[in-house]
Amino acid sequence: MVIGLAVLVTQCSSSMTEKHIAYLGLGSNMGDKEEHLRKAILEIQRLAGDVVRQSAFYVSKPWGFQSENDFVNAVVACRTSLTPRRLLHITQQIEREMGRTEKSVDGHYHDRIIDIDILLYDDLHIDYPDLKIPHPLMQQRDFVMIPLAEVMK
């Protein structure tokens, strides 16, 4: 279900650093979910790089755990000069600052104010214990693939 559409197109500031395109998946199922997504997107813009595309907000059922709280999800494309590792640290910092106290571990999911996942980063393939790109479960999740397809058009 689509509940809003906003496309941000910003000009990339001139920089001597190389820019990369990272696709980030966002989700919230607590409190003012749409406001949490909007705030996270502004923080990504402030700390990680230019948000050049944003999907609509989509409502989805919890995936991988039981909850009475539906999610609101979105995907953004971010033009960044950050390395994948630094981008991971920034997204985790945003989650913490917004009130997320724990990450999902080993398939144990729970309600959360905000979740930010790196889905893709250029055409890189990374397989570290704490960072896997492309995101290993994204193709199993319509709430990721539908907004991702929207921003990749």
Image: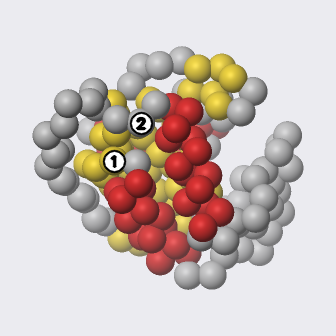
Residue type pointed to by label 1: Gly
- The kind of residue tagged 2 is Leu
Residue 49: give its label: 1
Q: Secondary structure at mark 1?
A: strand
Say whether residue 111 is left or right of residue 70.
Answer: right
How far apart, in angstroms, are the residues tagged by discs 2 and 1?
8 Å
Q: Quadrant of residue 31?
A: bottom right
Residue 62 sits above or below residue 131 on the image: below
Give percent across and percent down for residue 104.
Answer: 78, 50
Q: Which percent across, then down, holds residue 115?
A: 62, 57
Residue at 55% over, 51% down? 91
Q: Is residue 135 visible?
A: yes
> Residue 150 versus residue 54: which sits nearer the camera?
54
Q: Residue furthest front?
A: 16
Seen at 47% across and 45% down, the residue is 24
- Left or right: residue 143 versus residue 69 is left
According to the picture, the residue beneath numbered tag 2 turns out to be: 82
On the question of residue 1 being in view, the answer is: no
Residue occupying the point 53% across, 55% down: 26
Residue 74 vertical placement versus 130 (above, below): below
- Dot 2, crowdedness within 10 Å: few (<14), some or many (≥20)? some
Mark 2 / mark 1, whichever is N-terminal: 1
- How far across and down, in percent of the image, does residue 57 sit? 43, 64
Residue 126: percent from left, percent from top: 59, 20
Q: Are marks 2 and 1 in contact (CB under 8 Å)?
A: yes
**Nearer the observer, 66 or 83:** 83
Q: Vertically, is 140 above or below 127?
A: below
